Image: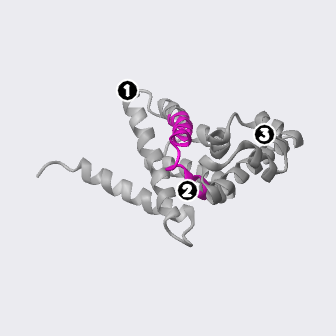
């Protein structure tokens, strides 16, 4: 679905503010960056900054994309092996993030510097976890809620690990890191499921 022009401009302005925040944080450290400096670097007024974000930490995290409705519906209705359907679901989410690799890199640099940025990012990840668990409820209606949440955590940790791997390597595509991590997660699950000798 294509966004109306006004909404596209709003999304682009929000991203430009986020990119300006991350650039300045990389140069000075987030604690030394002001909202006025961010507004100037983004080419907007301080008032406009506050129309988008409440503070510099929120601007650092930005507005991470949710899972797409198409992906959620496909996972809910999927009938193939759950590991393959989950992998396809996660790959599509990474595709949605692929235009923002510079943002992921910038955020990866400052997330360890600021507890508030980490907390905001964790809030977004909790939302994704609940959304994924909801999809799994439709797919696994007899599974207890704790199991669905654990599966959602297990899958989302794959994205986090893939991003960490990708950040530490030059030249590897994010999708390649995800393939590597997913293969390791499946192998680990098989080991865990082995009966005791």
> Is label 1 in a helix, a strand or a loop?
loop
Q: Which of the two discs, 3 and 1, sits closer to the camera?
A: 3
In the picture as drawn, the residue positioned furthest to the front comes out as: 32
What's drawn in magenta, residue-wise? 105-129
Percent x, y of residue 86: 49, 47
> Is label 3 in a helix, a strand or a loop?
helix
Compare residues 189 and 63 and report the one nearer the observer. Answer: 63
Q: CA distance from mark 3 to mark 2?
A: 22 Å
125 part of magenta stretch = yes
Quadrant for the N terminus, please: top right
Are circles 1 and 2 on residues that touch, CB within 8 Å?
no
Percent x, y of residue 178: 49, 59
- Residue pointed to by mark 2: 109
- Residue pointed to by mark 3: 49
- Residue pointed to by mark 1: 144
Does residue 193 appear left or right of residue 77 in this picture?
left
Residue 153 image-quadrant placement? top left
Q: CA distance from mark 1 to mark 2?
A: 37 Å
Residue 61 image-quadrant placement? top right
Q: Residues within 10 Å of mark 3 (few under 14, many from 20)?
A: many
Does residue 159 appear left or right of residue 70 in this picture?
left
123 part of magenta stretch = yes
Are circles 3 and 2 on residues that touch, CB within 8 Å?
no
């Amino acid at each position: 679905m294509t966004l109306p022009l006004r909404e596209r401009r709003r999304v682009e302005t929000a991203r430009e503010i986020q990119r300006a925040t991350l650039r300045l944080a990389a140069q000075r450290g987030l604690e030394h960056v002001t909202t006025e400096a961010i507004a100037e670097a983004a080419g907007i007024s301080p008032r406009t900054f506050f129309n988008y974000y409440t503070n510099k930490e929120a601007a650092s995290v930005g507005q991470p994309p949710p899972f797409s409705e198409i992906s959620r519906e496909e996972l809910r209705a999927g009938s193939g092996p759950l590991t393959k359907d989950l992998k396809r679901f996660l790959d599509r989410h990474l595709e949605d993030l692929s235009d923002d690799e510079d943002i992921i890199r910038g955020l990866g640099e400052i997330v360890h510097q600021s507890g508030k940025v980490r907390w905001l990012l964790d809030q977004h990840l909790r939302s994704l976890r609940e959304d994924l668990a909801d999809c799994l409820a439709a797919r696994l209606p007899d599974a207890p809620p704790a199991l669905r949440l654990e599966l959602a955590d297990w899958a989302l940790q794959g994205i986090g690990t893939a991003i960490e791997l990708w950040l530490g390597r030059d030249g590897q595509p994010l999708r390649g890191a995800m393939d590597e991590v997913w293969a390791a997660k499946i192998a680990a699950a098989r080991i865990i499921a082995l009966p005791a000798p």
